[in-house]
Amino acid sequence: MDYREAIAQAVELIKGHSGFYALTGAGMSTESGIPDFRTPGTGIWEKIDPIATASVEVLYSNPRLFYEVGFARFASITMAEPNAGHYVLAELEKIGLLKGLVTQNIDGLHVKAGSKKVWEVHGHLRSGYCLGCKRRFPFEELVQQVELKRIPPMCHYCFNMLRPDVVLFGDPMPPLFFEAWEVLEKECDLMLVAGSSLVVYPVAELPRLAKKLIIINLQPAGYDRQADVVIHEKCGKALGDILNELSK
Ligand code: NAD
C-alpha cells in the first residue's frame, strides 16, 4: 500500500468509528527534540542505560547517580514544546473525532498542546513527591535543589527524599493505567498508535483491546502484522495529512 492510499484508508477508518482513541510513544516527541529510546543512532539506549541510572532501585541505593544522571535527562525534557503531531491529536479531540489518548511519554507535550482526555500512564514532569510524608511539590522544586547540589532533594517538612512523579523501571503501573485499560476495553473500536516501538509492557498490550488498528511509526514495530493500516512516516507529517484529508 503506498503512502497516499494508507492515509486515505486511515481517514475512512476514522470517519467510520466512534470509539477512536490514540496511543503514543517516544517517537511522537522526537520532532520536539526529545530523543526516543530505540531509534538507531539517536536513541537513549545507545548512550545511557535508563535501567542503570533511573530505576527505583537506583533511586534508593544510589540517589546521587539517580539525580546526577537519570534525573538530568528528565530535567532537560521540560523545556520542549509540542510539535505538529501533538497539535493534530489535540485538534482531532476538539472536533469530536478522538475520544482520548494514552501516552507513554513523560514530557507532558499532549497536555501542553491542548489535549484534554490524556492518560499519562508513565507519569509526567509537572510534580514530584516526598517519599516520607507524600506531600507533592512542583517539579521545579526538585530541579532547583539539584542545581544547588542538594542531592538528593529533600522535603522541607519531614526531611525525607523527594522523587519525580514518573513511573520508573521497577515501579508498579499507576491506577490510571488500569482506568485507561477499562475504558479502551469497553469503548475502543479504533486505535491509532503513533511513535511507539510497542515493545514496552504492559502498555504494549493495549493495542490488543482495539478492534481496528492504525500504526504510524518510522520503523517497523510490534503489531505491524495485525494492523489494518501501517504508515512508515514521521508522526507530524502523517497526522497532518490525515487532518487535512478529514477537513476536505
Ligand atoms: P521507543 O523508543 O521504544 O520507540 C519509538 C519509536 O518511534 C521507534 O520505533 C522509532 O522508529 C519511532 N519514531 C521515532 N521518531 C519518530 C517520528 N518522528 N515519527 C514516527 N515514528 C518515530 O519508545 P516507546 O515505544 O515510547 O517506549 C519506550 C519508553 O520510552 C516509554 O516507556 C516512554 O516512557 C519512554 N520515553 C519517553 C520519552 C518522552 O517522554 N518523550 C522519551 C524517551 C523515552
Image (spheres, helix red, strand yellow):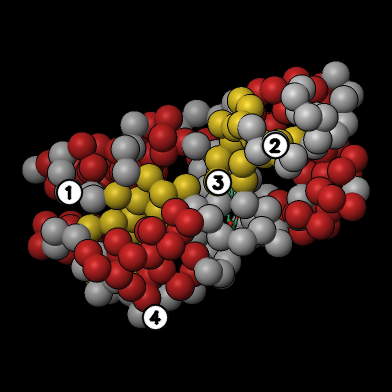
Q: Which residue is mark 3?
A: 123
User: Amino acid under label 1?
Assistant: Leu
Q: Which residue is mark 2?
A: 133
Q: Looking at the image, which residue is at 76% across and 55% down?
A: 55
Mark 2–mark 1 distance (CA, rounded to whole Å): 42 Å
Determine whether, in the image, residue 114 is placed left or right of residue 211: right
User: Amino acid under label 2?
Assistant: Cys
Query: Dot 1 surroundings within 10 Å: few (below 14), some, or many (20 or more)?
Result: some
Q: Which residue is mark 1?
A: 97
Mark before the other along the chain sequence, 2 or 1:
1
Determine whether, in the image, residue 103 is placed left or right of residue 78: left
Query: Dot 2 surroundings within 10 Å: few (below 14), some, or many (20 or more)?
Result: some
Mark 3–mark 1 distance (CA, rounded to whole Å): 25 Å
Instruction: Tell which tag, 2 or 1, sits nearer the viewer.
Output: 2
Q: Looking at the image, which residue is at 26% across and 46% down?
A: 241
Residue 89 lies in quadrant = top left
Q: Is residue 127 above or below residue 46?
A: above
Asked if residue 132 shows in the view, the reply is: yes
Mark 2–mark 4 distance (CA, rounded to whole Å): 48 Å
User: Amino acid under label 4?
Assistant: Arg
Residue 120 lies, in percent from the top left, at: 47, 47
Mark before the other along the chain sequence, 2 or 4:
2
